[in-house]
Image (cartoon, rainbow, N blue to C red):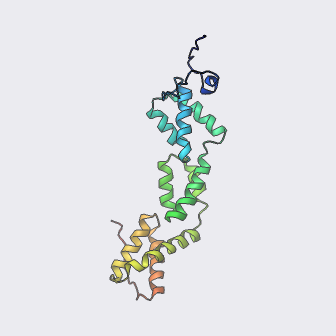
Amino acid sequence: MTRRMDWPGSTDAEDSGSSAPSRAGKGLPPQDPGEQARAICLRLLTGNPRTRKQLADALQKRDIPEEITDEVLSRFEEVGLINDAAFADAWVESRHHSRGLARRALVRELRTKGVDAALIDEAVGRLDSDQEEERARELVDRKLRSTRGLERDRRMRRLVGMLARKGYSEGMALRVVRRALEEEGEDDTGGVEYDPL
């Protein structure tokens, strides 16, 4: 009976012809840092798309050397497993439609994900002011009923505050809320000024 030696850097594919269980089969991480980095990235990408920065941070936490991290992440970019531009586009589309977030909030979120400023500008630039205002109006329409019975100024502050938390500018928020209240038959909203603090 011949005995198989585990060589550093051997992969599961190379091990597949052997009857001996692989390191991965035993629940042990691969010894080669490159293999370990690839396994970590693939596992993280299985659930959700990630940015290069998010993956780099995950590898750094697991003490993968920086040169290995750069090499693995560059290869993942080459084959399309990491695409920060596509990530930013999908993020903007999803968060604007599902959560109603405005450009300012989307920029803030993408920055925390480590997306490059130019890619953020490009993705967020696809939302125009009309789309943003229309989404703000939809948000106000949904919330309007729950504010009935409140005094006008309090109602105004509550609705404008909701839009401000989603990243809408004060000017747009005031305009949208005033119009919604007017259409509902609310008297003149007067000179209510919104103080986000």
The correct choice, above or below, for 54 with respect to 188 in the image is above
Is there any visible trace of residue 193 in the rendered image? no
The correct choice, above or below, for 130 with respect to 44 in the image is below
Is there any visible trace of residue 42 in the rendered image? yes
- Left/right placement of residue 190 relative to residue 104 reads left
Q: Nearer the viewer, residue 153 or 24?
A: 24
The N terminus sits in image quarter: top right
Where residue 156 appears, as percent x and y from the top left, is 38, 77
Where residue 90 appears, as percent x and y from the top left, is 59, 55
Q: Nearer the viewer, residue 14 or 47?
A: 14
Where residue 164 appears, as percent x and y from the top left, is 42, 67
Quarter assignment of residue 150: bottom left
Residue, x 43% and y 75% (percent of image)?
143
Residue, x 45% and y 29% (percent of image)?
63
The C terminus sits in image quarter: bottom left
Instruction: Tally the numbered discs.
Output: 0
The correct choice, above or below, for 182 with respect to 72 in the image is below
The correct choice, above or below, for 107 with respect to 173 in the image is above
Q: Nearer the viewer, residue 60 or 130?
A: 60
- Left/right placement of residue 53 relative to residue 89 reads left
Which residue is most to the front?
Answer: 1
Residue, x 34% and y 84% (percent of image)?
149
Quarter assignment of residue 2: top right
Residue, x 41% and y 87% (percent of image)?
186
Which residue is most to the top?
Answer: 1
